[in-house]
Amino acid sequence: MAFIFATISVEAAPNNIPHKPDYSHPKGTSPWPNYGERPKTNTPEVKAWIKLVDWSKVPKIPVRDVESPGDPPECPKGDVPKEDCWWTCTGCFAPDDIVDCPAKNAWGLTFDDGPKPGTTENLLNLLDERKVTATFFVTGMNSMKAPWLLQETIDRGHHLASHTWSHSGMTTLTNEEIVAELKWTEKYIYDHTGYKIKYFRPPYGDIDNRVRAIARQLGFKTVIWSSEWDTQDWQLEEETITSRQIIGIFKNDLQSLPKRKKGVITLEHDGDPKMTVMARTLLEMGQKNGMKPMDIAQCLGDKVGYNAIPAPPPKLKSAKKPNSDIVKKPVPTHDDDENENDDNDREESDKDDTPMAAQVPPHTQSESSNSKEESVPGSISGKAVSPGKKPSDAQRSYNTAGLSVACWTLAALAVSLVL
Ligand SMILES: [Zn+2]
């Protein structure tokens, strides 16, 4: 019996999405925007999505200047109208911007800009090792490089959210471009996982009331990060900051913890091995100081964390859950002297081995009352998955659920033969 289960666990890969990039379609045949480009706004998909927005509710704030496309905007020399609430140039937050975790000592752990094959896996292994979950704000464009990592991230208990398609400053985009960035990313994640994302972080934190009005109407909640809790780890890749400097910044932040009434949301990145090493150091430092790391859904007490999730697979009564963990490589530790902690200091979190989809009840209704139900053009309907209703065949082909059920059916047959 044990032998049978052992064999199955090897065969039951964590997901069955082919490990190949999604931009390898022959030219002109990809259903997705071209890799490395902003999505076009004159396609049938985007035209349909534009109709979801009541444009009379979107303030007429001008598109911001930018030196080169994809960069953050340039702040004007004159005053910025207060009513624009433009975070980049005035630090203004709207009342519904999410910038902190409500509970003291809660630590919303977030990693932006992935997925990145070869790096994301190490980050996931680190989080497994520390028994914590995080929110990954992924870009649609980078997801095309490694679509299988989306499901892998969910299967390992983490939370996916949107960081737009092309990582452009959102205030530098036209209304139509903003819609295209948000909806293509939502569709990409939905088509590859069955999860309809709810939380969105604007690249560079660049948001004003025009962008907010569009994002809200499309059902997204905006997440920035707590003031002063930007770790600056992105500079490691460009070598414009040292590890020691980042640790120093974080140490300063930690000193402010006792005075804080709320928890924090930190900003880190998934894009470079050095950042993963730094993530370990910061995790150890934070946990030693009583911070409790968790993903954004947990930090907000949002039991679902998405606008829709797949229906859970049917349960098999006598089946014992196979171990479907993939081979886990050790994550390198930080060379810096600061990192003297050992794993005995580890803070145990509430995370268990059950993927998020199985932890929450089937849920289809967005908390956002202004989220509209729509049909997403393309191969898979964009409608929320109804409770008890299975996802489409195409969707299930991306899902581990079908594979697990098949394996357990085989197991049951094998057991009955042995007996
Ligand atoms: Zn980013």
Image (cartoon, grey):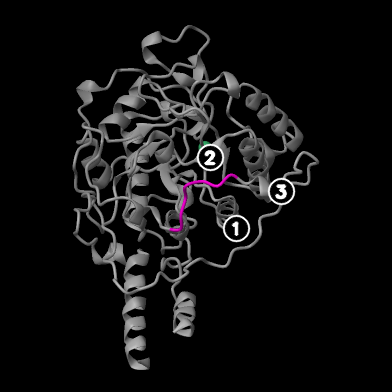
Residue nearest the viewer, comparing 58 with 2: 2
In front: label 1 or label 3: 3
Q: The C terminus lies in which quarter of the figure?
A: bottom left
Extent of the magenta region:
347-353
Specify whether residue 31 is in view: no
Disc 2, SS: strand
To which residue does mark 2 refer? 293
Q: Classify mark 1: helix, strand or loop.
A: loop
Which amino acid type is shown beneath numbered disc 3? Asp
Give the crowd class for mark 2: few <14, some 14-19, many >=20 residues within 10 Å.
many
Where's residue 105, x and y in %?
53, 30
In the rendered image of this protein, does residue 220 appear above or below residue 7?
above
Please provide percent x and percent y for residue 302: 35, 38
Q: Is residue 307 magenta?
A: no
Q: CA distance from mark 2 to mark 1?
A: 23 Å
Is tag 1's residue or tag 3's residue first in the polypeptide sequence? Answer: 1
Q: Secondary structure at mark 3?
A: loop
Q: Would you name the residue on which mark 1 appears?
A: 118
| Nearer to the camera, 178 or 355 | 355
The number of numbered discs placed on residues in the rendered structure image is 3
Q: In the rendered image of this protein, does residue 365 appear above or below residue 322?
A: above
